[in-house]
Amino acid sequence: MGKTITEKILTTHIIEGKPEKGKEVGIHIDQTLTQDATGTMAYLQFEAMNVPKVKTELSVSYVDHNTVQIGFENADDHRYLQSVAAKYGIVYSRAGNGICHQVHLERFGKPGKTLLGSDSHTPTGGGIGMIAIGAGGLDVAVAMAGGPFYLTYPKIIKINLTGKLRPWVAAKDVILKVLEIFSTKGNVGCVFEYGGEGVKTLSVPDRATITNMGAECGVTTSVFPSDDITRQFLKAQGREKDWVALLPDDDAVYDRIVDINLSELQPLAATPHSPGNVKKIRDIEGLPVDQVCIGSCTNSSYTDMMTVANILKDKKVHPNVSFVVAPGSKQVLENITHDGGLAHLLSAGARIAESACGFCIGNSQSPKSGAVSLRTSNRNFLGRSGTKDAQVYLVSPETAAAAVITGKITDPRDLENIGIIYPKMTMPKKFYIDDGMFILPPKDSSKIKIERGPNIGEPPKNTPMPENITAEVTIKVGDEITTDHIIPAGAKMKYRSNVPKYSEFLFEVVDPKFYERAKKIKESGLHNVIVAGVSYGQGSSREHAALCPMYMGVKVVIAKSMERIHKANLINFGIIPLTFVNKDDYTTIDQGDHLEIPGVRTLLSGTGTTMNVKNKTKGKEFTATFDLSERDKHIILAGGSLNYIK
Ligand code: MIC
Ligand code: SF4
């Protein structure tokens, strides 16, 4: 039987388990990446493993999230990361060099390799035929130490592309269509593999936009073939030798095939407050726009920037619009400078931001109260922009540029009515390349001292799981609670290396009293429990969404369903992820209820998969289930991965 691309890469990397769908396998990781916001904790955990050097082919530490440097905290983190990289054989990408996913695609990604990154948009690497997976920092630390990465051997869904995008319709509209079809929930344990004739019409940056935002569907990863277009891209990056062809076999078998005809697509938007709320631009056009932000790891490539620059050539930013552009990398910025794009943007009135996450993570460019903000990024969760009542729409660079000119949501195809011809840009044959912002690790690192400023704490410790859980429901939340709801990023992200401080912001957007309540419950000697609806923990890979609850004494999360990375993070920090057997039991619990789960250690040591939860307040009882491997159970019993490894 023939193989899919996913199977070809996974089967050559399996070091534990068998390739059976739905079963756990451990795979070898060739490359890792971290970014600063998840990286400090990942490297603190790596240090605790006492491994002298990373054991991967390549590990890169990027600084792209917290680059604002108000106060000493960000800079402390950067120096810590730089010294750790030098000590352990890791390439360091300095602040200003660009967003990890964009830079990794440009300079390091290789078809056929596995990449594990402590950021949920790591699947961007699928655009050049890698199996690139997002994970918590602790999992990435284990991979750097040479350990396997465990995942559920996935179901493979082929997205069969036919036709060709029409002018003004972009790769972003393809992934928004995918989100419309698959939504943001129910796709855990699947991989999207793109194929069909339409693939040949998409450039590597187009493909990377599509694989990047597959993260919003909750899939393990997304992957494109490695073909001649991939080769051209790597050649333009001076890396043709890194190319290998990677195509599925003709008789490859998929679990499901979904067809998308590129020729039939039209401009789309994800409307507030979920990437899954997809609407046609035609159905929302005319809405006045206050802000347009172009950039983020989804849409900040050379071609994206040049397309926008050429749409805006000789035009001016509408007076009611605040317009910011953040090129994805130093390389992008330098190339659009050489090719004249930057001049068009500047003369149109764009504000140029650093090549970093910036507006996307809400640590700059928060829009005015109640603003309508059009962004080319991938997430529009409530409050993520830093302005709680802002209405964020996710669109293509073309649609964003149209609003810059008209001041309202505009179908970019209508720009032809005002004489603008579609300037779809192609990639240069050879990029201007300067790798000066990478610092390579020295051969002899024995003299390197790790720099720990006052912002660098220690990873908090946890105690082993007790036999009986006696708890209070600290919070009950609804469906699709994202990690941005659980622990905000934005300006608060500077406390990532200081867990006690960062924990004060837990559930801030949903319920600002959470922290005080959790603290009281913990001090009273009870455990904290979180109750949630479907798809709990969507979005980011940030392990602080598990680490901070652990610090506050949360022992159990009971949800209707949970997302992959967050569930793995809960396990890594010794929190039991339970799901309701009967979803209606969710309605019987309220915040403040006292729960008892007896015999937890015994149950986790046995072969069963359920626990009885007694609701003392309501005088009721219900069953919850856990889907955990033997290893997961041992980790939880030990009180988390670090204890387990020791
Ligand atoms: C995000 O886009 O939400 C982030 C910030 O990049 C996160 C990582 C983090 O929280 O540090 C992600 O996507 O994993
Ligand atoms: Fe950075 Fe935004 Fe991409 Fe996350 S989604 S890595 S914050 S650009």
Image (cartoon, grey):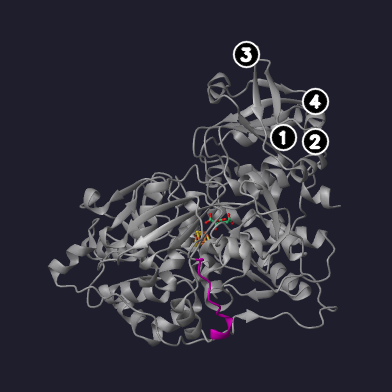
Task: Tell me which numbered mark, 3 or 1, is placed earlier along the sequence.
Answer: 1
For the residues labelled 3 and 4, the Cα–Cα distance comes to 21 Å
Q: Amino acid at mark 4?
A: Gly
Give the side of residue 335 with respect to residue 37, left or right: left
**Do tag 3 and tag 1 residues touch (Cβ < 8 Å)?**
no
The residue beneath circle 1 is 555
The residue beneath circle 3 is 618
Task: Tell me which numbered mark, 4 or 2, is placed earlier along the sequence.
Answer: 2
**Image point 83% across, 48% down: which residue?**
643
The residue beneath circle 4 is 599
The local crowd at label 1, few if under 14, some if 14 to 19, many if 20 or more residues have their Cα within 10 Å, is many
Along the line of sight, the residue nearer the viewer: 17 or 477: 17
Tell me the element at label 3. loop
Residue 50 point in image, percent of width and height: 85, 63
The residue beneath circle 2 is 465
Along the line of sight, the residue nearer the viewer: 445 or 263: 263
Q: Amino acid at mark 2?
A: Met
Q: Amino acid at mark 1?
A: Lys
Tell me the element at label 4. loop
| Region rendered in magenta | 239-249
- Is the shortest distance between ligand 1 and the CB of mark 2 under 8 Å? no
For the residues labelled 3 and 2, the Cα–Cα distance comes to 25 Å
**Residue placed farthest to the top in the image?**
619
Q: Main secondary structure of the magenta part?
A: loop
The local crowd at label 4, few if under 14, some if 14 to 19, many if 20 or more residues have their Cα within 10 Å, is some
